Amino acid sequence: MSKKIFSGVQPTGNLHLGNYLGAIKNFVDLNNDNSNECIFCVVDLHAITVKQNAKELRSNIQETIATFIASGIDPKKSIIFNQSQVPAHAEGAWILSCVARMGWLNRMTQFKEKAGKDKEKASVGLYSYPVLMAADILLYDATHVPVGDDQKQHLELCRDIAQKFNSDFEIENFLQVPEPLIQKEFSRIMSLKDGSRKMSKSELSDLSRINLTDDKDLIINKIKKAKTDPLPMPNTTKDLDERLEAKNLLGIYASLTNSTLEKSVEIFAGKNFSEFKEKLSEVLVDKIQPISLEIKKLLDDKLYLDNTLLEGVERANKIASKKIKRIKEIVGF
Ligand code: AMP
Ligand code: TRP
């Protein structure tokens, strides 16, 4: 069956190995399967749910587009665009915010994490963020949504919103209820400094993550400094339960070599971390360096990036404007 794929990434800078292994690598595989129709969105409306500097945001949008292309998404095949240029996203989000229930949104753990202790000072946008995400997906009748593990709850909300809309307006199967595509393994890459925390763009220490723009020396240095424990490398995957940092690094190795955790544990069992780290750096440099060089090259060709974006916006707008027109009719406008 042909799949309609939709996913989004926020242009908030520092795209990292977690974004790559949890999401973008998957986008590339889906893009390469000719039976799929893929749409990849730079979700700039989502980015402003927390304060952004306008100049930096503009350059982060370009960098995210460049990262998609440098990672292997073909903009001729897949639609690549930024959300703010297609008005149906904001319009759809408003209409769906009248379908979604407060009780549903109150359960969202990402809001609780991002808003922190001072919920009163969080933007209203940060709270209703998952409704905008639902609009993104539902406007394109997406059947499958590839994301990292942290977005699972938001996708369940999207499914609930689609079902409630269809039932409230008595229009069966109008909004397509999408399936999440979450990798079984390695769907959550952890910080290099703390195996219990997610690798994240917003973590203060740059040593906690491998950025997709890091060069060879930086990658080697970050892996050298990555936290481990005093024991030799584990002998079985069972040993990993208590050894979060070892588990994360072995997971990264397995994912990059398209292997399994079991096999990777086997290769390095009983060895020193230093030996493993050398091999890990090698595979990381092999994978990330070409992407990082290509991002730099693309960022020097602003005209190409602008034209690619323009084309993507036009193609996305064609689909989304049709759907929002129907949604408005159904609602009674
Ligand atoms: P964001 O940067 O928050 O827009 O995330 C873009 C995509 O990367 C989403 O599909 C996330 O689920 C995924 N992602 C972000 N951080 C990680 C991580 N540490 N491990 C795995 N996937 C991640
Ligand atoms: N919320 C997602 C994240 O932070 C980004 C996103 C926005 C998205 N809209 C989407 C992902 C639609 C998938 C589909 O990672």
Image (tube, rainbow, N blue to C red):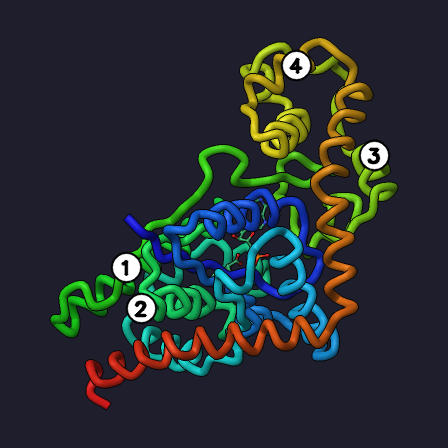
Q: Is residue 303 positioned above or below 276 on the image?
A: below
**Contact (Cβ within 8 Å) of mark 3 with mark 1:** no
Residue 121 visible within the image:
no
Q: Along the horizontal axis of the image, is 264 left or right of 106?
A: right
Along the polypeptide, which appears first: circle 4 or circle 3? 3
Along the polypeptide, which appears first: circle 4 or circle 2? 2
Residue 73 position within the rendered picture, expressed as x and y whole percent measured from the top left: 56, 55
Along the polypeptide, which appears first: circle 3 or circle 2? 2
Report helix, strand or loop for mark 1: helix
Report helix, strand or loop for mark 2: loop
Select label 4 or label 3 by which is in front. Answer: 4
Q: Which residue in the structure is indicated by mark 4?
A: 267
Residue 146 position within the rendered picture, expressed as x and y whole percent measured from the top left: 45, 50
Seen at 48% across and 52% down, the residue is: 31
Q: Which residue in the structure is indicated by mark 1?
A: 160
Q: Is mark 3 within 8 Å of ligand 1?
A: no
Q: Gap between marks 3 and 2, in whole Å?
A: 45 Å
Q: Which residue in the structure is indicated by mark 3?
A: 225
Along the polypeptide, which appears first: circle 1 or circle 4? 1
**Contact (Cβ within 8 Å) of mark 4 with mark 2:** no
Q: Gap between marks 3 and 1, in whole Å?
A: 44 Å
Q: Gap between marks 4 and 2, in whole Å?
A: 49 Å
Question: Which amino acid lies under the numbered mark 4 shown in the image of this protein?
Answer: Ile
Q: Is residue 266 positioned above or below 276 on the image?
A: above
**Contact (Cβ within 8 Å) of mark 1 with mark 4:** no
Q: Gap between marks 2 and 1, in whole Å?
A: 8 Å
Question: Which amino acid lies under the numbered mark 2 shown in the image of this protein?
Answer: Ala
Q: Which mark is residue 100?
A: 2
Q: Gap between marks 1 and 4, in whole Å?
A: 44 Å
